[in-house]
Image (cartoon, coloured by chain):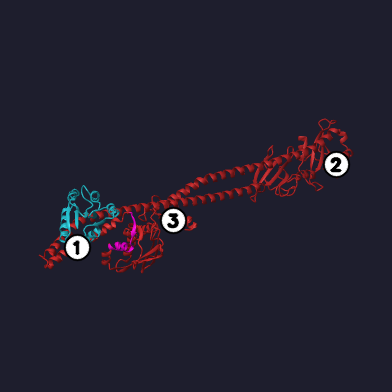
Amino acid sequence: MKILLVDDEADYVSTLAERLSFRGIEATWASSGSEALKYLDKEKFELAVLDVKMPKIGGIELKKEIEKKYPDMKFIYLTGHGSEDDYQKGVADSVYYLIKPVNIDDLIKIMKKVLE
Amino acid sequence: MSIVQYFFKPAFLEHPSPDNTVYKHTFNFRKIWKMTVIITAAVALIPLVSITAIDYNVTQKAIESEIMLRVERSASNTKRSIDFFLAKHKSVLDFLINDNTFEEINNSERLVDILAHLKSGFAGFVDIGIINSNGIQIAYAGDYKLEGKDYSDQAWFQKATKQGIYISDVFLGFRNKPHFVIAVKGACPTYRDKFYMLRATIDSEDFNTLLSGIDLTRNGDIFVINHDGVVQTPTRFHGDILSEIELPVPEYSEHTEVMEYIDVERRSNIIGYAYIPDTNFILMIVKDKVELMGAWYSTRSILILFLAGSITVILGVILALTTYLVNNMYIADKKRAMAMHRIGYDNKMATIGRLAAGVAHEINNPLAVINEKAGLIKDMFTYQNKYQKDEKLISLVDSVIASVQRCGNITHRLLNFARHLEVSIQSVNIKNLIDDVLGFLDKEAEYRSIKIIVSIPDNLPDMICDRGKMQQIFLNLVNNAFAAIGSDGTLTIEAKEKNSNFCTITVSDTGCGIKPSDLELIFEPFYTTKSSQGGTGLGLSITYGLVSEAGGYIKVESEVGKGTRFMVTLPYKHNTEKKEEKV
């Protein structure tokens, strides 16, 4: 399972990546959309977990960018913010829309489900 | 509301003072109603009444003067007839004087002839005599031996001497039959400065016939009196011949006059009279005014009846219309206030929602950091075996994670609740919804020892509805139940399928209950028994509005001291069309 985590809160996303690695999940993290796109130039990921509210490039926009390159990639939104509109868009894209804080085991379960 | 109640006890009368509730009326409806009724009634009735009054007076005056005129005409005609009658007799005597010399006429035998001729030609002549200038009757023809009778000291003789003609009053005389005398003075050529008098007695029967021929109304009377008020001809109602009349003797006038006289019995009489020239006679026509005005009186009652009818109809229409309009204004104003309040309330809820959502979002991020850091610590302990045995450390970290989890639950619930304050039609599980609503009240229920029983079957279908509105409906009912219970009680929420389209959700409490008199008013907007505690009287009214908007209905049963039960019946698929708000 190769996963890309994108969140503007570096402290959060780095900790999450470390915890996932304890559980044998290889996770790369980026603290902005542009950084994420750089990683994506180099390598391919199966799943991206995106924050919705980020400076410059938000999660929903980022998802569209990534999909241009890798149409098969799967996504999960994970956000503390998130308006009703964002939520509805997530639901419309049939993407899981999770609200922080999440239990790491629940997150892993959902990742697995998405990748199936 | 029956029509009688609608018009005689309109709703706005029951809320006279604008500030007895939080509901502020724009207008004082009672005052508007009163002003409108008074002004409209005045504008409509004053011209009607004044025109009727003017018409009444004008018509009455016209009819009165018409009556007067008629009486005057009739008196005038009769006077002419009498004049003619007397002139005729006078002319006959004049003719006799001119036709006969004194010597010829001063002969009783000749007079007997003349009398016979007169009697055959003119009715009424009774006797005839010649009186010399000394007042001695020197010749006579008639039933009495009156020759030699001296009249010199009698008033009539002196008057006749002076005026050349004399017509006496009516008297009974020897025959005891009413008659009068005409005397005409003639010159006596043989004796210079001497004259004689031709005197004729005339039965007044003819005279009477003349008067009785006049057409009279039922209470009318026509007769002749002399200047002293003594009746000269038969009357119907004013005494016998030669009796004193009870009416006043009218003032002298050359022309025919009419006057009104109110007699001792307070009856109004119209009197037409005419002085007959060269005589002592006054012709009197007396008519009962009431009788003459009879036609007017019936017209008058129709007029008054019509006026009364018009006033009643006008007032009725004004009252009904004003009541209808003001009541509609009142209802519209109430709706407006209600709508304003709804808007305010919705805004407030939306603001609270946004605020809550903002707070929850802000807290979520640091919470997530705490969660992951604590998680990492735990991971490090568990995965690296270093502190694996240290149960105290693990339990500390676990409690941090558990607290974060609790905080997370709260912010999630807040977000969930706030999200649904915005309008969205979705599929809602009723059990979840009720749990959400009760979630906020769990702690309070605990503090107040309120036992909450929720009994909702798992197989109850989801409802297609606006979740936010449903939340509001049940939050209101549950809040009310909590208020009614105070502390120590039970709140029960049950749901069951009513039929394939509807389900009924019952919220019952063991609180103080509602008085029967209040029960029918609780859904009325601005009806509150807690205005002193800040109640707006809108909670249940809004609930009612939301339920009926969704196509459902709400029923209530209550018993004072035992509790209250609200039964909300809702369709599985709510009526989601925008409808105008109902009060």
- Label 3 belongs to which residue? B11
Amino acid under disc 3: Ala
Tell me: A114 left or right of B341. Answer: left
Amino acid under disc 2: Lys
Q: Position of residue B87 (x, y in %)?
A: 78, 37
| Chain containing mark 1 | B
Specify the farthest residue to the left. Answer: B386
Q: Residues within 10 Å of mark 3 (few under 14, many from 20)?
A: some
Residue nearest the observer in this picture, B46 or B431: B431
| Chain containing mark 2 | B
- Label 1 belongs to which residue? B403
The question of residue A68 being in magenta is answered with: no
**Is residue A86 shown above or below B183?**
below
- Label 2 belongs to which residue? B119
Amino acid under disc 1: Ser
Tell me: B24 left or right of A64. Answer: right
Secondary structure found at label 3: helix
Q: Position of residue B117 (x, y in %)?
A: 87, 39
Tell me: B10 left or right of B566. Answer: right
Which region is colored magenta? B423-439
Chain cyan in the figure, letter: A
- The answer to whether any part of residue B334 appears in the image is no
Chain red in the figure, letter: B
Q: Position of residue B517 (x, y in %)?
A: 41, 63
Secondary structure found at label 2: helix
